[in-house]
Image: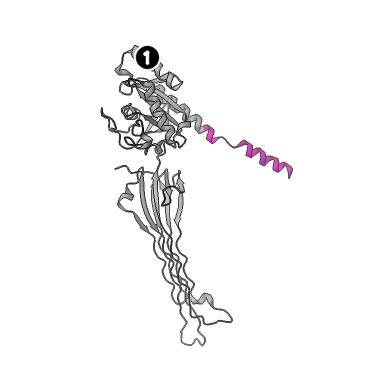
């Protein structure tokens, strides 16, 4: 399945049905009267986050979605049927923007979350609705209200617990393939990864989701290389694993290059917990690895992990480090707001 994380879609809700103008004409009924029914309501346009999707590719082939029109009212006080609604099914993590691609309408972060993007028009009243003691035979009815139409943007930001960042050929895809069942393309040339990949890693009985994005190079925030358009897929992560290849001549500069691009992008990535690892250490002598590790530590201010996904060196330690940060972050978000609870208790005591 091809990966697509942005799509432009036109939507239109249904028009309401018109009310009917009708009068009773029955044998042996001396006085008839108005009996025109109301029109049906137009269908709505909804969006729903569903499980099992991780791309917006369906919206590449269909960009127009229109809900059904309400049926007109009929005689004998018969109300028209409502128009059929339309639901856009999107992956969890999809954001909906207005046509300017900047104004956020809704962010769907949970499975089953629904939002009405366009409400259908109300049906018009039939002439029976306008009957009164002073106007017993109204001969008019309301038309149905028109539906809403707009153009929206769908933008997907994958839901993952941890994200892999680094320069091209830093070993991100190899790391993902080693610790998960994902099978990203791996080759010895830059930008092998052209779109994000997801995988589920397991360590000590605990599972978490890893996201691998294409490599960043100097000037990515200005569109150099593949740019920074895929960084949105690690915005929702709890921790970043920053891989720096031991084959880099200047590992400190390699770290600073990616760090600068994260800061230039924004989105809170510069403030996320970060674990730094010197990867691909199996290709160097032990003395050279120690030298590169000291250089990297000086650049990042912390002792880096030493790993090699190809040789399965240091992988357990890396996964446990990621797990610890994820668990700690999850515990913090799950903690109740004690200050609010205390204020509510105080109010009860005052009463």
Residue nearest the observer in this picture, 79 or 18: 18
Question: SS for tag 1?
Answer: helix
Question: Is the stretch drawn in magenta largely helix, strand or loop?
Answer: helix
Q: Residue furthest right?
A: 350
Query: Residue 302: image x %, image y %?
Result: 46, 20
Q: Would you identify the image quadrant in which residue 81 lies?
A: bottom left
Q: Is residue 167 magenta?
A: no
User: Would residue 162 be visible to someone looking at this image?
Assistant: no
Residue identifier under label 1: 291
Residue 111's place in the image compared with 294, above or below, is below
76 and 149: which is toward the camera: 149
Using residue 130 as the reference point, say whether residue 144 is left or right of it.
left
Decide if residue 33 is on the left or right side of residue 281.
right
Q: Is residue 333 magenta?
A: yes
Give the number of marks.
1
Q: Position of residue 204 (x, y in %)?
A: 42, 26
State which quadrant residue 210 falls in.
Answer: top left
Residue 305 falls in which quadrant of the image?
top left
> Can you see residue 219?
yes
| 167 sits left or right of 20 in the view | left
Q: Nearer the viewer, residue 340 or 5?
A: 5
Query: Magenta region: which residues?
Result: 331-351
The local crowd at label 1, few if under 14, some if 14 to 19, many if 20 or more residues have their Cα within 10 Å, is few
Residue nearest the viewer, comparing 213 with 17:
213
Q: Residue furthest top?
A: 287
Horizontal and vertical percent for residue 64? 34, 56
Give the residue displayed 41% in from the left and 22% down from the top. Answer: 317
Which residue does the image show at 29% across and 43% down from the upper left?
Answer: 2
Which quarter of the rendered picture does the N terminus lie within?
Answer: top left
Instruction: Give the position of the C terminus as an image quadrant.
Output: top right
Residue 69: x and y, percent?
A: 40, 65
Q: Is 209 above or below relative to 85?
A: above
């Amino acid at each position: 399945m091809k990966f697509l994380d942005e799509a432009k879609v036109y939507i239109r809700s249904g028009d309401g049905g018109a009310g009917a103008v009708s009068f009773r004409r029955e044998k042996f009924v001396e006085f008839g009267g108005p009996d025109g029914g109301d029109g049906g309501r137009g269908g709505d346009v909804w969006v729903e986050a569903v499980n099992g999707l991780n791309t917006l590719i369906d919206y590449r082939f269909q960009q127009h979605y229109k809900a059904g029109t309400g049926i007109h009212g009929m005689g004998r006080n018969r109300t028209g049927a409502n128009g059929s609604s339309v639901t856009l099914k999107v992956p969890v993590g999809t954001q909906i923007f207005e046509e300017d691609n900047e104004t956020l309408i809704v962010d769907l972060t949970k499975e089953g979350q629904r939002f009405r993007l366009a409400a259908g028009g109300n049906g018009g009243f039939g002439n029976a609705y306008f009957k009164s003691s002073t106007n017993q035979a109204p001969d008019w009815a309301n038309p149905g209200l028109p539906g809403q139409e707009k153009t929206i943007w769908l933008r997907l930001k994958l839901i993952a617990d941890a994200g892999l960042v680094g320069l091209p050929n830093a070993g991100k895809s190899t790391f993902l393939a080693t610790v998960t069942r994902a099978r990203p393309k791996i080759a010895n040339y830059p930008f092998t990864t052209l779109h994000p990949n997801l995988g589920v890693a397991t360590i000590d009985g605990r599972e978490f989701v890893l996201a691998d994005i294409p490599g960043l190079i100097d000037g990515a925030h200005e569109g150099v290389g593949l740019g920074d358009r895929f960084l949105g897929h690690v915005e929702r992560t709890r921790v970043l694993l920053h891989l720096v290849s031991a084959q880099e001549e200047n590992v400190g500069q390699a770290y600073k290059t990616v760090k600068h691009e994260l800061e230039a992008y924004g989105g809170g990535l510069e403030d996320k917990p970060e674990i730094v690892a010197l990867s691909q250490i199996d290709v160097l002598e032990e003395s050279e690895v120690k030298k590169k590790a000291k250089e990297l530590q000086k650049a990042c201010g912390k002792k880096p992990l030493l790993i090699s996904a190809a040789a399965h060196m240091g992988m357990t330690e890396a996964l446990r480090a990621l797990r610890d940060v994820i668990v700690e972050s999850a515990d913090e978000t799950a903690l109740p707001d004690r200050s609010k609870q205390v204020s509510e208790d105080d109010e009860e005591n005052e009463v």
